[in-house]
Amino acid sequence: MKDREKILRYFAASGDEAKDMAIRLLDTLADSVDRGRPFAVGPFMAPFSRQIGQTIAAHMKTVVAKSFGGYHEAERVKIGFTRSDYDGPVDFGVSLLSVTWDGRYCLIGHRDVLGSLMGLGIDRSVLGDILMQGAGCQVVVDSTMKDWLMDNFHKVAMVPVKVEEIPLSEIQPPKQTAKEVRATVASLRLDAVGAAGFGISRSKMVQAVEDERTEVNWQLAKSPSQTVKAGDIISIRGRGRIEIVEETGMSRKGRTGLLIHRFK
């Protein structure tokens, strides 16, 4: 592909993870579809993979990028490419497991479930989102791994669990509760927008970036001075995330008005 190196240079600027995603999607999937396969689907990847897939498709012209993670708002998704003239179905190979435990162990959280799964020696790429539900959770998985997980996944943090497959139609996405925040900022720097959106001081926002606890569109933030824009999602580990919904105009003093949604 003539634009291969151009695409890889573009995503290399976002870090090694983005570049590795681009190489995997371009060389393993998109190229095989361009050569004649009707479609090809990759493993579960971070949300940023959507942008990478769309960029590859825009340059190649002969393929269309699709994504699926079990439900519309899924964070971890599989990226698939189809030929631009292909109208048939695409099997993303996604299954849903229900994991339940004794309700007395109410402190079990997402980190415990993920840690126990990774402790089985599996690759993160076979796991989609983990949706916590009180005394249990739902785990989106690669269909090729569902039987193995049902046979081998028996405990979370030493607590016995019951694992069974359920129809994907029974998935229960987390309810998104957003607080609307309206603010004005002197510039669209990450530290200024983040401080306004999270309701913290600018110095604390800078510290969160320097401590590598901050991501922009699921990529590690580059610096406090990084420019952000409408549509971007900023997350701080332990604080949740915000979405810059839109710019609402300019004040008389030249400050930019923003509508921000803050999610817990």
Image: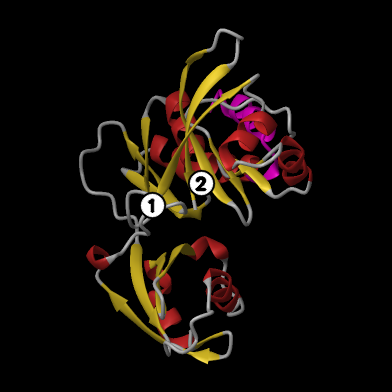
Q: Residue at x 34, y 57 (%)?
A: 70
Q: Residues within 10 Å of mark 2 (few under 14, many from 20)?
A: some
Kind of residue at disc 1: Gln
Q: Disc 2 or disc 1, which is closer to the eye?
A: 1
Residue 222 left/right relative to 249? right
Determine the secondary structure under disc 1: loop
Q: Residue 13: horizontal and vertical position, in percent?
A: 69, 31
Q: Is residue 225 magenta?
A: no
Front in this rendered view, residue 66 or 250: 250
C-alpha separation, residue under disc 2 versus residue under disc 1: 35 Å
| The image quarter in which residue 64 lies | top left
Given contact means CB atoms under 8 Å apart, are the residues at marks 2 and 1 in contact?
no
Q: How is the image coloured?
A: secondary structure
Q: Residue at x 25, y 32 (%)?
A: 85
Residue topped by disc 1: 176
Kind of residue at disc 2: Thr
Q: Is residue 3 magenta?
A: yes
Residue 67 left/right relative to 10? left
Residue 182 left/right relative to 198? left
In the picture, the disc for residue 28 is: 2
What is the span of residues highlighted in magenta in the rendered image? 1-17
Residue that sits furthest to the top in the current view: 252
Q: Residue at x 75, y 38 (%)?
A: 206
Front in this rendered view, residue 223 or 13: 223
Q: Residue 154: horizontal and vertical position, in percent?
A: 48, 89
Most common SS among magenta residues: helix
Residue 21 left/right relative to 136? right
Sequence-first tag of 2 and 1: 2
Up-down relation of residue 163 to residue 252 (above or below): below
Up-down relation of residue 214 to residue 105 (above or below): above
Q: Residue 166: horizontal and vertical position, in percent?
A: 27, 74
Q: Residue 158: horizontal and vertical position, in percent?
A: 58, 90
